[in-house]
Image (cartoon, grey):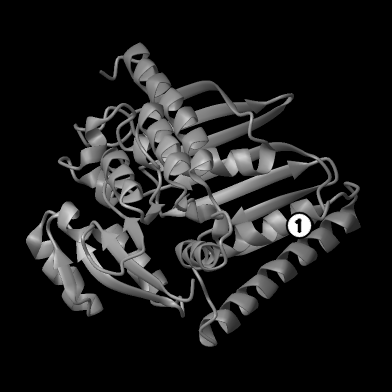
């Protein structure tokens, strides 16, 4: 395959990030957009100078020479759209979460196997610069065996989905958490192991949005003898993503939004050791900041979406598996579905329903 001819389905705010990423793939050309909302189609097509505009998905699938469908619609629509596209012979890219139910995810996996097309899922936090660097360090053995993973996903009360009482996420088990918990799930599986079980979920209500039953969450995971923890909030003072990796031979602390990483090796708790350790950590932050500034200045900076879409495009051009397969996406949805059920149970237990 020498060129990728792409259509983007769904013209909401998620699509802008995808379109920006596709423009940076040298051999890709987005030739069409599709949405049931004609105004959204026209606005997106005009902004990104895309010629073909559709409000009918079936009509889009008749577009000549099209090879890849990038689906940016809400996740409860993914299964139907993806299966139609795959049965029509198109490769498919899906936003996370892949679906809202394990049944729908399994149908996508089944269809992909039957049709033999390429299908991938965007787990974009895995491809953020600091997470890629952490992955490299872990694989090279800098931390030894990982025994604990902690992830904090913080949003302010101005979060677009949480603040919109009519947003689709509030209609599903788990509410706003149902859309965002895929991130800590796939990160925990990535660093701790695939055989992830949900031990418990705790929720509370701090904010005043009446349409949100809960807006604070702590979840614990288990992989064998090792543990993971996720904290999610929609009441934070700022948007932030923090990841702590605890290994037998060292620690890693990641600030994903600011793309910084601290490596904390073993040390003795002595006075001078603490001083040198503080200097080492400060130096690492300065180094990360300088590298990020140079990367931005030279036009080399890539978000997680941009890196993933570039890698997905490469998998199509060179006939390789996508960086995140639909089997991976299905495994995450199964855990997500279990968590959402536990959220509902916790809300009932706490009198929030």
Name the residue nearer the viewer: 140 or 252. 140
Crowdedness of circle 1 by 10 Å Cα count: few (<14), some, many (20+)? Answer: some
Name the residue nearer the viewer: 102 or 118. 118
Percent across and percent down for residue 76 are 28, 38
Which residue is at 40% across, 34% downward? 105
Percent across and percent down for residue 94 are 38, 51
Which residue is at 23% across, 46% downward? 163
For residue 98, say whether it is visible.
Answer: yes
Q: Is residue 72 above or below residue 301?
A: above
Q: Quadrant of residue 145?
A: top right
Residue at which label 1 appears: 137
Is residue 291 shown left or right of residue 87? Answer: right
Q: Quadrant of residue 214?
A: top left
The quadrant the C terminus occupies is: top left
Percent across and percent down for residue 294 are 59, 83
Q: Is residue 163 above or below residue 272?
A: above
Exactly how many numbered labels are in the figure? 1
Q: Residue furthest bottom?
A: 298
Name the residue nearer the viewer: 225 or 150. 225
For residue 208, say whether it is visible.
Answer: no
Which residue is at 29% across, 36% downward? 207
Q: Is residue 308 above or below residue 291?
A: above
Q: Secondary structure at mark 1?
A: helix
Is residue 250 shown left or right of residue 296? Answer: right
Is residue 30 shown left or right of residue 250? Answer: left
Percent across and percent down for residue 45 are 19, 72
């Amino acid at each position: 395959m020498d060129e990728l001819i792409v259509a983007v389905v769904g013209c909401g705010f998620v699509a802008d990030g995808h379109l920006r990423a596709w423009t940076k793939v040298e051999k890709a050309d987005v030739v069409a957009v599709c949405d049931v909302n004609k105004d959204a189609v026209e606005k997106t097509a005009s902004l990104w100078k895309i010629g073909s505009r559709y409000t009918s998905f079936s009509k889009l699938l008749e577009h000549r020479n099209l090879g890849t469908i990038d689906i940016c619609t809400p996740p409860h629509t993914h299964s139907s759209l993806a299966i139609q596209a795959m049965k029509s012979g198109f490769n498919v890219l899906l936003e996370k979460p892949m679906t809202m139910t394990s049944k729908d995810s399994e149908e996508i996996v089944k269809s992909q196997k039957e049709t033999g097309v390429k299908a991938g899922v965007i787990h974009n936090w895995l491809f953020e610069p600091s997470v890629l660097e952490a992955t490299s360090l872990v694989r090279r053995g800098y931390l030894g065996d990982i025994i604990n993973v902690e992830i904090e996903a913080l949003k302010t009360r101005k979060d677009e989905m949480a603040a919109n009482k009519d947003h689709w996420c509030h209609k599903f088990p788990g509410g706003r958490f149902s859309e965002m918990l895929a991130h800590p799930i796939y990160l925990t599986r990535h660093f701790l192991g695939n055989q992830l079980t949900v031990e418990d979920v705790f929720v509370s209500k701090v904010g005043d949005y009446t349409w949100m039953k809960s807006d604070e969450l702590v979840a614990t995971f288990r992989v064998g003898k090792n543990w993971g923890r996720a904290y999610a909030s929609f009441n934070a003072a700022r948007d932030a993503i923090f990841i702590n990796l605890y290994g037998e031979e060292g620690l890693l602390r990641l600030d994903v939004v600011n793309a910084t990483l601290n490596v904390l090796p073993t040390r003795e708790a002595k006075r001078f050791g603490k001083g040198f350790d503080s200097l080492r950590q400060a130096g690492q932050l300065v180094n990360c900041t300088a590298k990020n500034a140079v990367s931005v200045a030279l036009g080399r900076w890539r978000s997680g979406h941009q890196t993933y879409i570039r890698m997905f495009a490469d998998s199509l051009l060179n006939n390789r598996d996508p960086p995140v397969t639909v089997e991976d996406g299905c495994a995450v949805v199964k855990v997500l579905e279990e968590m959402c059920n536990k959220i509902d149970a916790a809300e009932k237990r706490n009198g929030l329903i």
